[in-house]
Amino acid sequence: MMEDAFFRRPRLASSTVSASAPPSAGESGKSKTMSATAAERAREQVVQLRDAACDVARPKVNAGAAPIRVMARMVADLVAECRELAIPPELMATEIVNRTIGDVDVRRISATEDGPEFATLADDMGLALPREPIDGIPATGKRYRWIHRQMEAFERQLLARHVDMRMYDLNGVGNPLLREMLSAYLMRVWGYTVPSTQIHLSLGSLDGLNKFFQGYTALQRKSLAHSYDAFQAAVIFPAPGFNVPEWQAQSLGLRLHRLHTSADNAFKVTPDELRAALAENHDIRIFYLTVSSNPTAFAYTPDELRALCAVLRESAPDVLIAADLAYIGTGEPADDRARMAIFSDPEVLRQSVLFCSFSKTHTLTGDRCGFVVFGDPGLAADLGPGWTNGCAALPADWQLRYMAYVKLFGEHPEIEERIRALYRLRRERLVRQLQHLNEQYDLFARINLDDGGTVYNWSQLRPGEDVFSLFSKTGIAGVPGSAFGYSDDFVRLSVGCIPVPAVE
């Protein structure tokens, strides 16, 4: 791993520690004692390395560096250093636990720790290569090959419709067959259909948000007869909240209106808070709403969504709801379906733009399968330049693979059920693990039991504790509240790439 000078830190002077060789005859008792001693020495060494890593990373976060990046790099660099020092992998696995990133790595699912019913997910989704060892068992590769056969079949279907994926898509919003498939997908999972012409493809929901903001700002400036200086528009961003869309909007000249929520309301915007923000800020044009929240892991109820939509309809009918649905599908299906039913109201849908992704719901982060649903057909057409001028045409093989996934999940809904069950298992285990650690270290003021809305845990630390003291004492790395526009007495922990150990 190449080191960034920003993160480089002095190495601790220490001897290399490695696993002991098998004991020879007559020395088994002595070797076992030495092995135990060596293991304890190695653990103490890792603890010292953790403390040193915190000493370097803490001032960077305090100086305003991106907290998620700092924490993730801190862990990655520490793991690399431990490998150089020949720290046993099993010790690293317990003493350096990366819970900074929310993406679940199906290749690292453990039959022992997660359960045998989840161990074949990588193979069953076509992500594992033929004969690739997953938890020590070679993948069959059947679904991997199936995915590629489907890609060829879909390309032939498109050619029969005179759509050549190897040529420019002049509209830049994706091929018509995939958009029709997504329209049918919405009917299956949410119970209502949006015409395919109102669905634009995106490389994950973040790309969709960026294209939306680009198209929107261009449209508003055009309506002002190219008077760029006269352009003023604000976006409501609740805090704590995901900060990347904030950066996107701000970089395009949109003003950020950060609406701070409170723990008393489970960090959700209330109708009164929204009404007051609209009354005090007449330039608000967009309300960014994560229906299931990153980082708090709380999700809005149907009644809460209905009340917010009523405020907008009555007080600001021209304000768009930019609904980020990246985590709809990670919780209980009936609850998510009830939430999404609110957007089936024609008046609500017309005021809404929905940002969707398979990244978290189907553990396809690297595949970047996203789409944007416009409730207003006129807005879908008007914001098209955000696509045509942003990427010209979406990658052909990406669209074909995306189509294969949509077909796969339609034919095998049990895969989606298993993914949700895995999330549920890890969420519950993480809460129990934190409660157990709290008995030892007295770190938390409140451990969030969440409502199963996402793949995160949002917990409050005691006064004097922060993400660095948490990491130093337990080896668990999280993300501070400042990464989400909130205070650092809160920490976001992910069920993430690795399993959560069972705690009795």
Image (spheres, rainbow, N blue to C red):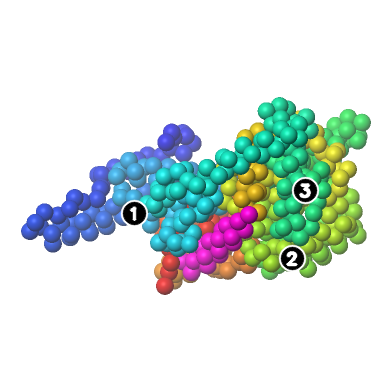
**How far is the residue under mark 2 from the one under mark 1?**
43 Å
User: Which amino acid lies under the numbered mark 3 shown in the image of this protein?
Assistant: Val
Q: Which residue is mark 2?
A: 338
Q: Which residue is mark 1?
A: 90
Residue under the image location 42 percent in, 59 percent down: 111
Characterize the local packing of mark 2: few (<14), some (14-19) or many (20 or more) Cα atoms within 10 angstroms. Answer: some
Q: Position of residue 39 (x, y in %)?
A: 26, 56
Q: Is residue 415 magenta?
A: yes
Quadrant of the image containing the C terminus: bottom left
Q: Dot 1 lies on which element?
A: helix
Q: Which residue is mark 3?
A: 373
**How far is the residue under mark 3 from the one under mark 2?**
18 Å
For discs 2 and 1, the disc positioned in front in the rendered view: 2
Q: Dot 2 lies on which element?
A: helix
User: Which amino acid lies under the numbered mark 2 shown in the image of this protein?
Assistant: Ala
Contact (Cβ within 8 Å) of mark 1 with mark 3: no
- Left or right: residue 16 versus residue 151 is left
User: Which amino acid lies under the numbered mark 1 shown in the image of this protein?
Assistant: Glu
- Left or right: residue 230 versus residue 103 is right
Count of numbered marks: 3
Q: Nearer the viewer, residue 253 or 382?
A: 382
Closer to the chain start, of discs 1 and 3, is 1
Residue under the image location 30 percent in, 43 percent down: 85
- Left or right: residue 417 versus residue 182 is left
The magenta-colored residue range is 411-433
Characterize the local packing of mark 1: few (<14), some (14-19) or many (20 or more) Cα atoms within 10 angstroms. Answer: few
Closer to the chain start, of discs 3 and 2, is 2
